[in-house]
Image: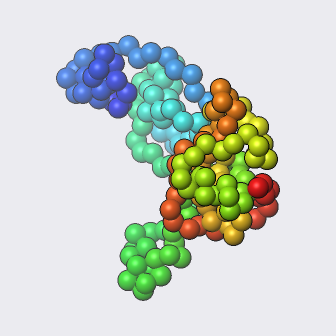
Amino acid sequence: MYSALKKNGRRLYQLAREGVEVERDARSVTVQDIKIVAWDSPAITIEVSCGRGFYMRSLAYDLGNALGCGGHMKSLVRLQSGVFSLDAALSLEHAEQKLQDGEWQDILHSPDVVLSAMKAIVVGKQTEDLIRNGCSLPLALSLPRGKADDRCRAYSVDGRFLAILTFDSTSGQWHPDKVFALQYAQPEGIPQFS
């Protein structure tokens, strides 16, 4: 099996190139949906909605084995990854044109776009200073109490993306995990805390 996964410290694709057959360990993965898009025997086109750690090549191999005919993957198109979709993608030519026209900011996303599923809070100036200095946030602050390893996005009152905070259940405090020096605008509808 050609895969970047490791078995006994060696990548499976390296072993496969050497002709070594390796029994792969079963892994728990999430599959939300599998649809048959086209069937032109002996080829089948499927669309899969899945979580991280899912290997399409393994699915093709396993389907072929289950059907008794063997199977492999001819091509792969990733339609979506997180908040990014192929429908919203730009061609390289379009991106180069934007760069040449000095309009590259129009096609960039702020870093917090990829974190949009994470809860978010707005903090006051005093808390912003603590976050920027990497300090844990005192219990007296009116931040929501989290669960162990809970994470949230923090924004300043004027809408700048400040940091990713992680909740430490041992101390009961939020800690700045990643602090951003650049200034990005906050999305609408985020609750404010002092």
Q: Nearer the viewer, residue 115 or 92?
A: 115
Q: Position of residue 134 (x, y in %)?
A: 54, 48
Q: Residue at x 35, y 32 (%)?
A: 4
In the picture, measured across the screen, residue 118 lies left or right of residue 82, that is right
Q: Position of residue 173 (x, y in %)?
A: 67, 37
Relative vertical location of residue 22 with respect to residue 39 in this rendering, above or below? above
Placement of 148 over or under 85, stated as above or below = above
Q: What is the tally of numbered marks visible in this picture?
A: 0
188, above or below 19, in the image:
below
Taking the spot 75% from the left edge, 46% from the top edge, the residue there is: 141
Q: Quadrant of residue 33?
A: top right
Is 80 left or right of 144, judged from the image as shown?
A: left
Q: Residue 22: image x %, image y %? A: 33, 15
Residue 19 in view: yes
Task: Name the residue nearer the viewer: 56 or 148.
Answer: 148
Which residue is pictured at 64% across the width and 58% down the height?
128
Q: Quadrant of the C terminus?
A: bottom right
Q: Where is the N terminus found, in terms of image quarters? A: top left
The residue nearer to you, when weighing 46 against 28, is: 28
Residue at 56% from the left image edge and 64% from the top image edge? 110
